[in-house]
Each structure stands twice: as structure tokens, then as C-alpha cells.
Image: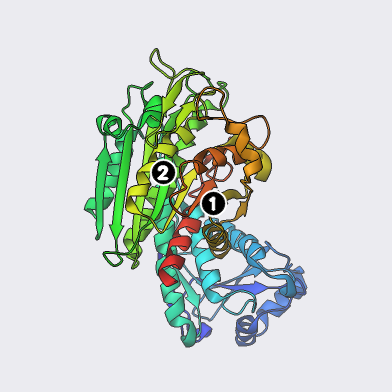
Amino acid sequence: MNYTLQINNLLDTASDCICLPIFSDQSLCKSGLQIDEACSKIITKAITRYDISGDTGKAFTLSIDNQNFSRILLVGFGDPKEINTETLKKSISALNSQINDTNIKNLCIAFNDVSPELKPEQVIRETITSVENGRYCFDQFKTKKTPESQLSEISFLCDASQETASDATISLANAQVKGMNIAKDLGNLPGNVCTPSYLAEQAQTLADNSNNFSVKILEEADLEALNMGAFLSVSKGSIEPGKLIILEYKGGKTDDAPHILVGKGITFDSGGISLKPGASMDEMKYDMCGAASVMGTMTAIAALQPKLNIVSIIASAENMPAGNASKPGDIVTSASGITIEIMNTDAEGRLVLCDALTYAEQYKPASVVDIATLTGACIVALGHCTSAVMGNNDSVVNELLDAGKQASDKAWQLPIWDDYQEQIDSPFADIQNIGGKGAGSITAACFLSRFTKAYPWAHLDIAGTAWVSGGKNKGATGRPVPLLLQYLLNKEAS
């Protein structure tokens, strides 16, 4: 899809269709009034004749003669006094549905003055993200491919004063969508294709094709040399060897401390000896969506080339039952020297992450954020709309929350107070890998916090947001690539 800016008068637009906002009182914006006047009040007459609704998420198409455009698409934005990011999302979703059901080849969107509460850059970013999400299709393994949409170009009306910022937003949105699609593809791939070795190959390809990137792949022998007993306790039960994948991007000054992303990359999670129920176990290919989001974010970074140093560490393994797999009650020693009693082999993500977080210490990082589909308890707490954030540094946590708001990729903070720490104490080792029945997301973060005392750290639990479960819409979402990308770009700007 080609995204451009329309700086000239809207009447000069040579598009199949112009998209205009309409509000719940059936009023039009400035651009809408201009078009209505030039078209002999055709919009006003249609609103009255067909009682066109301006409620949020409604849409109506009018045919036009004797103009550079042949159609007008009216999209409802509801009460103009209550327009916000959420109503914008609903309105753009209605727009998306309309353009997918037509033969429109090019479209001009005139939402630049829809509300003083929304910056034109917000509208552009949200629109591109929504349109591309609607266009995304994972049909690699289908013999009959999905027909491509006829829509090939979208332009955004903006004032000359908005041109520079809007142009930069298009570049940002394109990079974000590219990263989200990579994250979706990796998440949607079956476990017999997307293995730890496959993830390592994709990281190598990204580094080979991008400026300022380098890659290092640590094999199981390397992990043994680094005393990563926690990581290896997970990977040893599978014939697929575990990998620690390190991607380094050097866009900042040589001596600038890097910001680090650590992704959980369990490419299939059977639960190990603590075997999961069979129902929906196919969705455990999504247990590497933390790693997928890191790869997606680094793909976007490769496109944008910010002046920042970034390191991504992907801890990738399969969690399988086998004769040599870890058993409940086993005790292992992590790379940090902390001993861990494995109470449940299905709490494996924190075992690979803790050694990756210890590995991150050597970089003396400015910040570390780990991303993981870590706990079902997070879904109980926050559902599927919101990722959970916890950490040992309020600044990092708040920066992630702010980035989520900016990028429409919501997160919410949960506490990891000392009161919860005792739930992971073990009578036989330093700690155990699960807490009690309550506060499962928090005690998982408490476990990770034992390995992150050397730097500012936050943890994102994306178990509820990384994929849509069941039904015809099942699939990876590409989240939280928007949040992570915005977080890093904010670091560049600070």
C-alpha cells in the first residue's frame, strides 16, 4: 500500500473516493462543508433523505458525478465533544470494513480536523495500522491464496504546516506495521517450522540485510559454559536445541548504554512433564510471541534507524516431555548462581528468561524490558485488551505505560511488592518457580525480579494480548510491537 499526503484543496483530489467524518448531530467538519457546497448540497440532502447516522462506527457511501472523485464515504465519529483514541479506533474500523467490501483503488481521508483532541499524526498512525491489520493474511500453507485488495493508495488531507510531522508519521506507521507483520508471521507459523533454529536464522537474515546490526547465536554448549542451568533444564527435553539469540543495533554513540529487550521464545510449550490439557494445545505455538514481538520491533528499528543503541536477547527453546526432561521437584542452578526448585515444568518461561536477564548484565544497560506470554493469571486479571507491566523502576514502568497510550497499545501496572516475594521461597532451594494459587502474574514477576537487581527493569506479561484464541479470527496480533517501538523512540527523543 502506498500512503501519501494531500496538501492541496480537497476538491482537487483525484481519487476514487473521499472519506469524511460525520458526527452524531449529523453535522460535518470544515472539509465536509466545503465538499457539500461544491457538490450542490448532495451530502446534506442525503443525510436528511436517508437519515444517515453519525454514531461512532457507522458508515455510508454516496455516489458523486462531475467531480475528480466518484464517491464520498461518510464515517460516524459520534459526539464531537467525546472524540478520543477509542472512538477513533471504532470509526477507522468502520472505514476499514467499507473499503474492504468495495472496488476502491485509491482513497483520500479527510480526518485532519475531526477534533482538537486528536492530532493529525494520531489519525494517520491509527488509520495505517488498522488498514494494514485488515489487509494482513496468513495463507502460506493454503493451496488457495486470498485475493489481494484492489486498494493500492491512501492519501491523507493535511495543512502545509502539518506536512513534515505527517510525513514522519507515515514512515513510523509503515515501519511499525512491517514489524507487527513479522511478529504475526512468526507467531502464526506452526511449531514444526518455527523452531529455535528458525528464529536464529531470521535474526541472522535481519542483521545481514540491515545497517548497524550484528548477531550472535549461543548454542547449548555455550549455555553450559555460561552455567545457564535454568535455561537448559527446559531445552534438554526436546530434540530441538535451545538458542540464545542476541541482536545488537548500534545507532547511538559508542559509549551510550544500550536499552535491552528480552523476549521469551518458547516455540512450542507442551507443559513438559506437567503436561497441559489437550484442548487448545495447538495454540502453544504462540508461546514465543514475546520473542516474535522483539523481532518485530527490531525490524521496525532497522527501517527507522534511530540514534540509539539497542540489544535484543531472545531465549528460545521447546518445552517437551521426555525421558530426560525436568521433573517437578528437580533443583537447578541458574547462571546467577541462584538455585531453583522446579515445582511445575509448565512454568518454564521464567526459567529461560532468568538466565537471559543475567546475561544482560554484561552490557551495563540503561534499561531492560522483558516481554513474555508468561501467565494465564494475567488474562484473569486484565483480559485480552491490556498487557501487564511490573518492574523495579518506576521511570521505566511509567515510560512503558505512556508509550502504550501514545501507540494505542494499552498496558496496566500491577504491583510486585515485597509481600508477594515469600510465595516463591523454597524449603530446599533459594527459590521455587511458582508461587501459590493467588497473584500468579505477580509472583512470576517476583521470580524474575530476583535476577534484575543490577539495572532498571520492567516486565511485560502479554499472555492476554499476543494472540486471539479460537474461532475464525484466531491468530497473532503483533502486540506489543507498537508499545515497544514507541518506548524506544521516546528514549531517542529524551
SS of the residue under disc 2: helix
Discs 1, 2 touching: Cβ within 8 Å: no
- Judge the density around disc 2: few (<14), some (14-19), many (≥20) Cα neighbours within 10 Å: many
What residue does disc 1 label? 392
Q: Give the residue type that dot 2 points to.
A: Leu
Query: Dividing the image into 4 quarters, which one contains the N terminus?
Result: bottom left
Q: Seen in the image, is 203 located left or right of residue 28?
A: left
Expressed as whole percent of the image width and height from the top left, the position of residue 294 reads 41, 49
Q: Is residue 472 visible?
A: no
Q: Quadrant of the C terminus?
A: bottom left
Q: Identify residue for label 2.
A: 357
Q: Seen from this angle, which residue lies furthest top?
A: 323
Task: Name the residue at 58% across, 75% down.
Answer: 111
Query: In front: 7, or 483?
Result: 483
Q: Nearer the viewer, residue 21 or 273?
A: 273
The answer to which image quadrant residue 395 occupies is: bottom right
Q: Earlier in the sequence, mark 1 or mark 2?
A: 2
